[in-house]
Image (tube, rainbow, N blue to C red):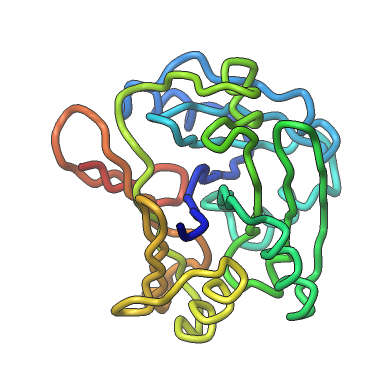
Amino acid sequence: MSQRVRLRQAVFVADELEPLCGELERELGVTDPFHDPGVGEFGLRNAVYALGDCFLEVIAPVQAETAAGRYIERFGAGGYMVLFDLEDLDAARARVERLGVRVVWRIDLPDIAGTHLHPADMAGAIVSLDRSEPYGTWRWGGPAWAGQVGEGAPGALNAITVAVGDPGAAAARWSEVLGVERGEGQALQLDGGAVRFREPAPGGRRGLVEIDVSAPGGAREIELGGVLLRIG
């Protein structure tokens, strides 16, 4: 059986958690976010919402000279980071080392392991390679998900779109790091999700620019926090 690679979490960065958190709650029906004290290590505060068995997170800097704060100064609020759940994290870490991709943070815990990759080496966003144990749990989602599968709001995280100057090169790099094949239009097909790449719109921002989710309320598109949120 092939090793699964899932899109588990997408992250917005903003100056403050509000009003973006309130907008996500109204549009998607998500509630009761988990505020992870661990992100204080990075000079941040956050709110993590469970949507199905995937997650949307909002982070905001609370001190000077944070990576997130510098990102906002350069590009403004918007999509910031994406987390993947890989069954074979060891193989992915070996590929990262072989390719010379810089690791900016790494942790190994009994129920989850994670590796953050330098955005300059990945193009488009901070990429986190994670492995949940048992697979499908998600410590980053809070106590209800640590070592067990919790229950989120009805819906799912289906896809992201990354805008970069060279979509083909970015797709090739992400494909090699994640260990997944490229499909039509430079899209990476994951277990129950997809990653797409395109050139930035004229005068538009780069990076994580679109997030596709399922949620009640009918199909619609909404600009939230610098990201086009497609709801289906």
Image quarter for residue 14? top right
Q: Quadrant of the N terminus?
A: bottom left
Which image quadrant for residue 126?
Answer: bottom right
Residue at x 41%, y 59% (from the top left corner)? 190
Residue 50 on image: x %, y %:
47, 27
Residue at image coords 49%, 77%: 171
Q: Is residue 225 found left or right of 83 in the rendered image? A: left
Kindly identify the residue that appears in the image at 57 percent across and 48 percent down: 85
* Quarter location, residue 73: bottom right
Where is residue 103? Give x, y as percent: 81, 63
Tell me residue 148's x, y (percent). 57, 21
Say which residue appears at 65% left-offset and 29% top-offset. 139
Image position of 230 with respect to 164: above or below: above
| In-front residue for pair 79/126 | 126
Q: Is residue 179 left or right of residue 61?
A: left
Residue 85 relative to residue 158: left or right: right
Outermost residue, front side? 1
Rendered-image quadrant of the C terminus: top left
